[in-house]
Image: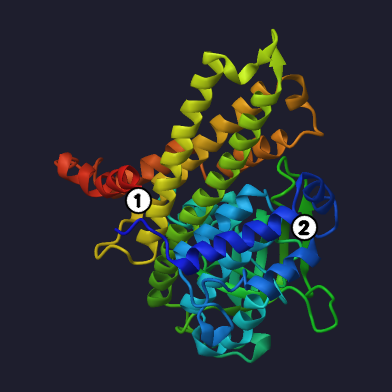
Amino acid sequence: MDAAFTEEQDEIRRTLRALLDKRCGPDEVRAAVRTPAGYDEALWRQLAEQLGLPGLALPAAYGGAGCGPTELALACEETGRAVLPAPLIGTAVLAAPLILALGGERRRAELLPALAAGQSSAALVVPGGQLGAALALTGPNDGDWAGGGRAGGIQARWSQEHGGGEPRAGGGWRLYGEAEQVLGGHTADVLVVAAHAGGFARSRTLLFTVRAKGPDGAEAPGLLRTRQTAMDETRPQARIELRDVDAELLGEDSSGGDGATDAVAAALAATGATAAACLAAEAVGAADAALSRTVGYVKERTQFGRPIGSFQAVQHRLADLYVAVQAARSAAYYAAWAAGGGRAVPEPGAGALALAQALEALRAVAAEAVQLHGGIGFTWEHAAHLYFKRAACDELLLGPVHRLRARAAEQAGLFASGGGDGADVGALVGPAVHAAVGA
């Protein structure tokens, strides 16, 4: 692994940081999250038009920049540093890769150029708040996470009123059900929905696309979306209700057979590996920014006639946080490199381990930032609470941390009977450790 970044990758980081430093301070973040959209739409358009941020990891044939997971992770690190409220994760990290992997040429040409240009946004709708399991980060994504075909979740059925016959691409599928904690779901123009088809006996989890808005801007018939109150306002979430909503199957196999089911599981797992790396990098960026603010504060705040940063106890606490952030950064970079095909043998547990480490680092830094800022750190007016809320809610969304690590250990074969020897452990964590040390 070459730990050095290319000139292009460094330029992505520098340009994005410069723009966000000007346009996305704590006051701007607070103002943006209180808008109906939950983010600064003008800033999002600027990020799309000037930097091509939504299409950074999409092929040039669909209006993207043709980069990979590493570049996307670097961008997420900078957006995390600013605690940017934007549809970046829902659109570029979760939904667009699934459309690219499963959509076929027609669906890609219809949806991806607008997403890459920032003209529309997308969201991944997973029922039951099981996003981590759906992405194979906290458990096997064999379909049980979506309800197993029983009551609840989202059900897909073929409607005869659309022409009858066998399911085919272009129409006939109807969705019924609901999902909560959908990132950016209240404003997304395209919904990628995980739903069960075939009833209980032949239940299988498939992905469908729903046009949330018609040409006139009105909501699709039968679709009800409600923005939910969230602890972390910079991560807008929504409740999605579908009442016989028209949908189109996402995949080449229009019948939605076993081949389509396997393809969906594989695409979700691949998306999960990249998403874990990007969210880990985002958490690292937030932790680094919180730590920098805290270091600056302890240099200025005086007690007993001297800066509190001169006290050895404070220095030790900050040094421990610095080590944790740097280790998490190395793990996130390695996970992004592995997700982009850096290793000949895929490492499905690298992303989950990096995400677990980054979430722990952010949680520790955010807590210490509140403590070391003293009384002002507990007020809503201070930026420290933005990082604290992000740390708490990210773990609720994709964790908890112990489940991320347990899933990685399971994939490494640590829990298999007669297995779990040192070779298995080394195969999983050895490269990540070497990457961290080398970085």
Locate residue 139, reporting x and y percent: 41, 49
Locate residue 397, reporting x and y percent: 58, 46
Label 1, on which residue? 349
The colour scheme applied to this rendered structure is rainbow
Locate residue 197, reporting x and y percent: 53, 70
The residue under label 1 is which amino acid type?
Gly
Locate residue 222, reporting x and y percent: 77, 70
Most foreground residue, 7 or 251:
7
In the image, is 404 to the left or to the right of 303?
Answer: left
In the image, is 315 to the left or to the right of 230?
Answer: left
Q: Is 341 above or below relative to 248?
A: above
The residue under label 2 is which amino acid type?
Tyr
Label 2, on which residue? 39
| Residue at x 79%, y 28% (from the top left corner) | 379
Whether label 1 touches label 2, CB < 8 Å: no
Q: Is 32 above or below relative to 244?
A: above
Q: Write down the quadrant of residue 308 in the picture.
A: top right
Q: How many labels does the image show?
A: 2
Q: Is 407 above or below relative to 402?
A: below
Most foreground residue, 139 or 319:
319
Residue 248 in sight = yes
Quadrant holding the N terminus: bottom left
| Residue at x 45%, y 62% (from the top left corner) | 70
